[in-house]
């Protein structure tokens, strides 16, 4: 299972996405401050562990979804795409 981080333009989008992940069966999804290595408009991100990045659960206001490998972050999805 991989660790993912999703960043957002608004706090509301982060909350909606976190709730959608939980409803989709990702019980450990949680809101947290965005790691310093990443940037975010609102400063709030959603951390979660899953077999897949669960892009379909992200609010339309998502900035990006990253896979975390230790201290490294790989962009998997940009919200504007």
Image (cartoon, helix red, strand yellow):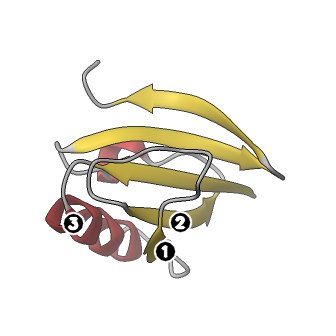
Whether label 1 touches label 2, CB < 8 Å = yes
**Nearer the camera: disc 1 or disc 3:** 3
Residue at point 62% right, 59% down? 50
**Nearer the camera: disc 3 or disc 2:** 3
> Total number of numbered labels?
3
Residue at point 39% right, 50% down? 7
Residue 18: percent from left, percent from top = 35, 70
Q: Give the mark nearer the N terminus: 1 vs 3.
A: 3
Residue at point 51% right, 81% down? 27
Whether label 3 touches label 2, CB < 8 Å = no
Residue lying furthest front: 36
Image mark for residue 11? 3
Callout 1: helix, strand or loop?
Answer: loop
Number of residues whose C-alpha sits closer than 10 Å to that of mark 1, classed few (under 14), some (14–19) or many (20 or more): many
Callout 3: helix, strand or loop?
Answer: helix
Residue 48: percent from left, percent from top = 56, 66
Residue at point 29% right, 31% down? 79
Q: Nearer the viewer, residue 73 or 20?
A: 73
Structural distance between the alpha carbons of marks 1 and 3: 15 Å
Q: Nearer the viewer, residue 41 or 19?
A: 41
Image mark for residue 47? 2
Structural distance between the alpha carbons of marks 1 and 2: 6 Å
Q: Which residue is under mark 1?
A: 29
Q: Seen in the image, is 66 located left or right of residue 61?
A: right
Tell me the quadrant of the picture where the N terminus can be found.
bottom right
Residue 49: percent from left, percent from top = 63, 64
Q: Give the mark nearer the N terminus: 1 vs 2.
A: 1
Q: Is residue 79 above or below residue 80?
A: below
Q: Is residue 25 above or below residue 67?
A: below
């Amino acid at each position: 299972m991989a660790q993912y981080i999703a960043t957002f333009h608004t706090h509301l989008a982060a909350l909606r996405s976190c709730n959608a992940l939980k409803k989709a069966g990702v019980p450990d999804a949680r809101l947290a401050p965005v790691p310093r290595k990443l940037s975010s408009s609102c400063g709030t991100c959603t951390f979660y562990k899953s077999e897949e990045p669960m892009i379909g659960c992200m609010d339309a206001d998502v900035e990006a979804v990253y896979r975390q490998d230790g201290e490294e972050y790989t962009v998997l999805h940009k919200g504007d795409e």
